[in-house]
Image (cartoon, rainbow, N blue to C red):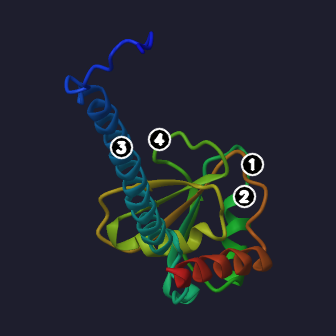
Amino acid sequence: MRTDRPPVRPRSGRRPLPPLIFLLVLALAALGVWWYVLRQETQQVEREAEACASASEEAPPTTLDPASITLRVFNATDTAGLAQTVATDLKNRGFVVEEVANDTSGREVTGVGELRHGARGSDAAEYVRLFLPQAGDYLDTRATAVVDVVIGPEFTALASAEEVAAALAPATSAAADC
């Protein structure tokens, strides 16, 4: 009674290498995914810290009193009397205006204007920027805290009291979130 089936060979010669390679590739892929996730989390924490730092740096000082800021107003346009008009408006808002004149610096002023100041006047310049948004910034070597407000050719008007208050409100809330 013989069957036509061939005899069964023992499987002692199995090769474990292909499954091991597959498991190694799978482990490397899992490590890659975890590395990516952890790196993304680290970058998110760094972005939040940077945003908090920039919010605190960019936030204009809310404790400044306009009466403590000394300004010089210069006209860099062809419109006669513009510096005097702006100086009067700034005085009405409480600033101390030391000088009103045409700009004789020789610097080309573009846009709405420029705020020129030394290192000691940086906080005051940031506060004045609320009243003259989009003004350029020029840091010079002066030793005083006096800020020069140079009116440019695209100047139309100073920011209203409501716009200044609105600019101050989000800056304080953004810094408070950090």
- Badge 2 or badge 4: first in the primary sequence: 2
Closer-to-camera residue (10/66): 10
- Badge 2 or badge 3: first in the primary sequence: 3
**Mark 4, secondary structure of its residue:** loop
Residue where numbered disc 4 is placed: 106
Instruction: Inspect the image, locate mark 2, and give the three-letter code of the amino acid beneath it.
Output: Leu
- Badge 1 or badge 4: first in the primary sequence: 1
| Residue 151, x across and y down, in percent | 64, 55
Residue 32's disc number: 3
**Cα distance between the residues tagged 2 and 3:** 63 Å
How many marks on residues?
4
**Cα distance between the residues tagged 1 and 4:** 17 Å
Q: Are marks 3 and 4 in contact (CB under 8 Å)?
A: no
| Residue 103, x across and y down, in percent | 54, 51
Residue where numbered disc 2 is placed: 82
65 versus 166 height, above or below: below
Rate crowding at label 2 as few (under 14), some (14 to 19) or many (20 or more) other CA atoms within 10 Å: many
Residue at 57% x, 85% y: name it: 66
Write down the quadrant of residue 149 in the picture.
bottom right
11 sits left or right of 75 in the view:
left
